[in-house]
């Protein structure tokens, strides 16, 4: 079975629970759920509709700040960004625009404005979204095409560490989570796209396009 990130056929069974099985790529180290276990778009949206994230939720704003504080420190004044996978209650836009930046919202279900995918951005955020990508290589190539040289890609997603921890990991139990990116996987991505990389926290990564 081919890896959806690097396309290698060198993948192997990693773990199995009551819901589905998981595979691990020996090349890029991505852990992924085979397509046969993916939910439909309709079911996926129904699950997303249950999310209660909103700009008024101080806890959610604090959660996002784990990425936004280190990212905003790198941005030039009035930098223009894209919140890719912003969800039904976009929060990054008002948070960063309060600091003088400009942000566009894009989401395949809630803010599907295809014209935004023809622009170039100084920075892109994707928070709690990349683990939902069913074609991560194509979607990362899209994000790379939208990012200006020198721009930043800020990602928030929880990272797997080892098999024992994975077996007890609540994060894998969300049936819409189908790709899990370890630190090694992010280094592979950085090498593929020629990005600098840093990890501000245990669930954040900032990549800079060189």
Image (cartoon, grey):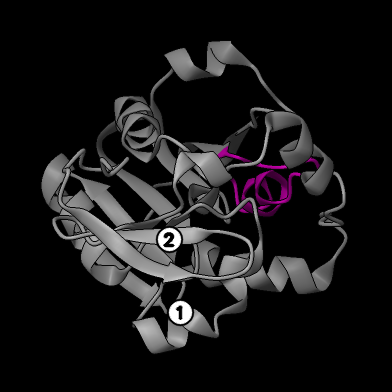
> Left of 30 or right of it: where is 101?
right
Q: Would you identify the image quadrant in which residue 116 lies?
A: top right
- Which quadrant would the C terminus be assigned to in this image? top left
Mark 2, Cα crowd under 10 Å, few <14 / some 14-19 / many 20+, is some
In the rendered image, the vertical position of residue 63 relative to residue 138, given as above or below = below
- Tell me the residue that label 2 is attached to: 22
What residue is disc 1 on?
166
Q: Is residue 149 above or below residue 13?
A: above
Asked whether disc 2 touches disc 1, contact meaning CB atoms under 8 Å apart, the reply is yes
Q: Could you tell whether 47 is left or right of 190 in the image?
A: right
* Quadrant in the picture for the N terminus: top left
Q: Position of residue 135 (x, y in %)?
A: 41, 34
- Residue 66 part of the magenta segment: no
Q: Nearer the viewer, residue 1 or 80?
A: 1
Residue 177 horizontal/vertical position (percent): 57, 55
Q: Is residue 202 above or below residue 134?
A: below
Q: CA separation, marks 2 and 1?
A: 10 Å
Where disc 1 sits, the SS reads: helix
Q: Residue at x 55, y 38 (%)?
A: 84
* Residue positioned 68% across, 54% down in the render: 95
Which region of the structure is painted magenta? 84-100
Counting from the top left corner in percent of width and height, residue 58 is at: 81, 71
Secondary element at image label 2: strand
Q: Nearer the viewer, residue 179 or 54?
A: 179
Categorize mark 1 by other alpha carbons within 10 Å: few (<14), some (14-19), many (20+): some
Give me the residue at 65% from left, 71% from top: 63
Residue 61's quadrant in the figure?
bottom right
Residue 33 shown left or right of residue 197 in the figure: right
Given residues 185 and 53, the one toward you in this image is 185
């Amino acid at each position: 079975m081919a890896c959806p990130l690097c396309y290698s056929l060198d993948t192997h069974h990693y773990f199995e629970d009551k819901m589905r099985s998981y595979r691990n790529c020996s090349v890029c180290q991505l852990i992924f759920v085979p397509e046969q276990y993916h939910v439909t778009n309709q079911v996926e949206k129904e699950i997303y509709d249950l999310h209660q994230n909103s700009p008024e939720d101080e806890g959610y704003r604090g959660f996002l700040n784990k990425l936004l504080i280190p990212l905003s420190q790198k941005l030039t004044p009035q930098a223009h960004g894209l919140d890719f996978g912003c969800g039904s209650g976009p929060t990054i836009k008002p948070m960063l625009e309060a600091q003088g930046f400009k942000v566009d919202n894009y989401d395949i279900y809630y803010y599907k404005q295809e014209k935004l995918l023809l622009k170039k951005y100084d920075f892109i955020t994707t928070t709690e979204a990349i683990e939902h990508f069913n074609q991560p290589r194509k979607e990362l190539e899209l994000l790379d095409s939208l990012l200006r040289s020198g721009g930043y890609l800020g990602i928030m997603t929880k990272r797997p560490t080892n098999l024992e921890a994975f077996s007890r990991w609540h994060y894998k139990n969300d049936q819409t989570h189908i790709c899990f990116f370890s630190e090694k996987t992010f280094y592979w991505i950085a090498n593929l796209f020629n990005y600098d990389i840093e990890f501000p926290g245990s669930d954040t990564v900032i990549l800079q396009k060189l």
